[in-house]
Amino acid sequence: MNVPYCIVKGKASLGQVVHQKTATCLAITGVRPEDEKSLTRVKELCTSLYNDNLAGINKWGGGQMGLKTKRKIEAREKIAEEEARKKAALY
């Protein structure tokens, strides 16, 4: 189905296209002949940056945990170490 798409920062910039205050998404169905060239350029740009960019699609996040998660993991490790010491003391 090869429909070009792109992600735009901010709803206001999309709203300018449709002469509204904000817009969450756009589907362009018709174009004036004088705007055809610029739409083709935008289409090619969106296709190259988003549709054809498999590396960007497959990568999620940076693999960094937040502070609260790090603290929870440290607490679990500490509890596991204490239990291991108690088991070692019993045997």
Image (spheres, helix red, strand yellow):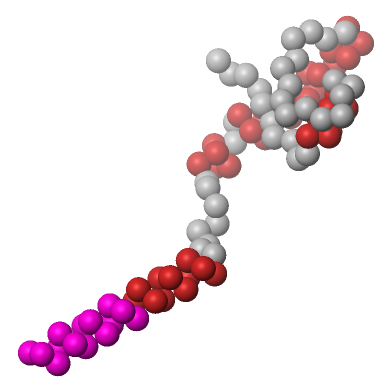
Q: Report the span colored magenta.
A: 78-91
Task: Look at the image and say whether residue 9 sits in the magenta stretch.
Answer: no
Q: In this view, does 79 lie to the left or right of 42?
A: left
Residue at image position (75%, 15%) is 28
For image coordinates 50% across by 59% down, the residue present is 63
Q: Is residue 29 above or below residue 89?
A: above
Quarter of the rendering occupied by the C terminus: bottom left
Q: Quadrant of the N terminus?
A: top right
Answer above or below: position of 34 versus 3: above
- Which residue lies at the image location 74% right of the left edge and 21% below the top edge? 26
Number of numbered callouts drawn: 0
The part of the image, by quadrant, that contains residue 83 is bottom left
Asked whether residue 4 appears in the rendered view, the answer is: yes
Q: Position of residue 31 (x, y in %)?
A: 83, 10
Looking at the picture, tell me which residue is in the foreground, 40 or 80: 80
Instruction: State the residue lying farthest toward the right.
Output: 34
Residue 79 sits in quarter: bottom left
**Would residue 88 be counted in the magenta stretch?**
yes
Q: For the stretch drawn in magenta, what is the main secondary structure?
A: helix
Residue 56 in picture, x, y percent from top left: 58, 42
Q: Where is residue 54 in the image (x, y as percent from the top left)?
A: 54, 37
31 sits to left or right of 51? right
Q: Residue 50 placed where, x, y %?
A: 64, 33
Looking at the picture, tell me which residue is in the foreground, 38 or 60. 60
- Left-right relation of 1 to 8: left
Q: Residue at left 71%, top 25%?
A: 25
For this orientation, the residue located farthest to the bottom is 89
Q: Can residue 46 be seen in this view?
A: no
